[in-house]
Amino acid sequence: MIITTQFAQVSSSLPVKDPVYIFCIILLAIWLAPAIAYRLRLPPLVVLILFGMILGTNVLGVLERDAQLILLEKVGLLYIMLAAGMQMDLGNLQKVGMRSLIFGLLTFSVPLTIGVISGQLLGYTLLAAILLGIIYSPHTLLSYPIMTNLGISQKEPVGVAVGSTVVTSILTLIGLSIVQAIASGNVGILLGIKLLIFLPLLTLFAFWIIPLLGRQILDPFATFLTPHFVFVLACLFVTASATLLLGVDSIVGAFIAGLALNPLIPLSSPLMKQIEFVGNSLFIPAFLISVGILSNPSILFSNRENLSIIVIVVIGAVIAKFIAAWLAGQLFKYHFDEIMIMFSLTVSRAALVLVIALFGKDAGLLNEGIFNAVIIYILVTCLAGPIAAEIFGKRIATKIELL
């Protein structure tokens, strides 16, 4: 009787407010997502966003994006950028440096241009259209494990695509910082000083002091990892706080911290496994669920205008990455299968796009229609990339076996 009464009280007071209930629901969603993703053959990222969408105030109304969830979301956001910096293959960028740089510039500028044109066609302001272009530009290497499984990760087009990720990520963050400054009215000489003088100085200082301290403190293969893990988190939040003091978004500082820590912590080390474990177990999934809560699936089908937005955004985002891969392929004399490999590695978008879209929604630059269209475009590209990687990766692997 007491349990029934308690349950009735919870049911009548949705969305839930008690942190115990909130944490319980989030953990259950995080626990169930991988199994559901495996059965549906979807990336877990997609399932977590869908969980947030269903549980959010726009569908079942179980969870809302309150202060507790915003805290988890913010930490998850910074954690994503830290991991992105730490996992960058900087050695690969040096190996195929010029081609990675050229392809990075192409796979950033072509989507940026098409995104701005898409935004103008949809009738958005120039600043909102530029932000949409920035949303089109970055990519995540969701399909890279497929290349490893097929034994073609050492092929030059794969290396070029992987190296280009560093270029696109840096250019995207610079572009986002400029848009944020314009949106907040902080444009002027001070912005130029911050971006051209203080931010590079902060970056150089981080690249000096973090490795200097890290070599004294970190032992990537130690068995007792608590002080090492805390040091990594301290680097993350100190650098993120420093960029905030400059008036630059904290995600830039998190990315800088990741790049500075990159040479100190091997990908195969126990410390890296610990860092990935904590992020993938709680903070990053919580961020994805929070983004899902923000989305409103009903608005996509409430009128034809929203459907046209989805079509323009999804087609524009996919075609933009294909054009960039095709141009690079022509320049580097790659055959079609190799071009499609580069396309499959760069078409998928995930965490960084969510970060930018979240800023656009909070800043009032993106309305609900375009925000939800971005969610759909993430889902589509996360499916398109692995499918293309399987098809064209197998063709290249077969050709290698025949040689």
Image (cartoon, rainbow, N blue to C red):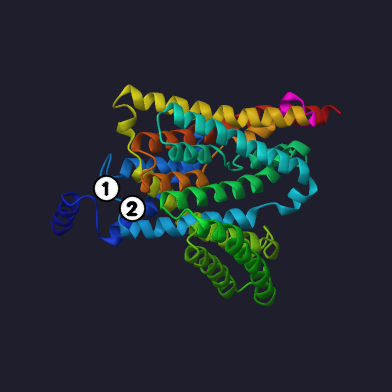
Closest to the observer, 212 or 150? 212
Q: Residue furthest right?
A: 403
Foreground of the two, 45 or 202: 202
Identify which residue, 28 or 82, lies in the foreground.
Answer: 82
Q: Residue drawn at (67%, 62%), measured in percent from left and top?
A: 269
Classify the position of the C terminus by image quarter.
top right
Can you tell which quarter of the image residue 272 is in?
A: bottom right
Which residue in the rendered view is the most extreme toward the bottom?
Answer: 216
Percent coordinates x, y for residue 351 in the rendering: 51, 47
The chief SS type of the magenta part is helix
Residue type for callout 1 = Val
Closer-to-camera residue (190/352): 190
CB under 8 Å between callouts 1 and 2?
A: yes
Any part of residue 32 in sight: no
Q: CA distance from mark 1 to mark 2?
A: 9 Å
* Residue range (magenta): 332-339
Lateral position of residue 372 relative to residue 224, left or right: left
Which secondary structure, mark 2? helix
The image quadrant of residue 297 is top left
Where does residue 364 sit, x and y in percent of width and height? 35, 44
Q: Which residue is mark 2?
A: 25
Q: Which residue is mark 1?
A: 62
Residue 186 x %, y %: 44, 55
| Residue 179 versus residue 390 in the image, above or below | below
Q: Is residue 216 magenta?
A: no
For label 1, the SS is loop
Report the residue at 39% width, 38% height from top: 371
Label 2, residues with CA under 10 Å away: few <14, some 14-19, many ≥20: some
Pick the quarter of the image with the N terminus.
bottom left
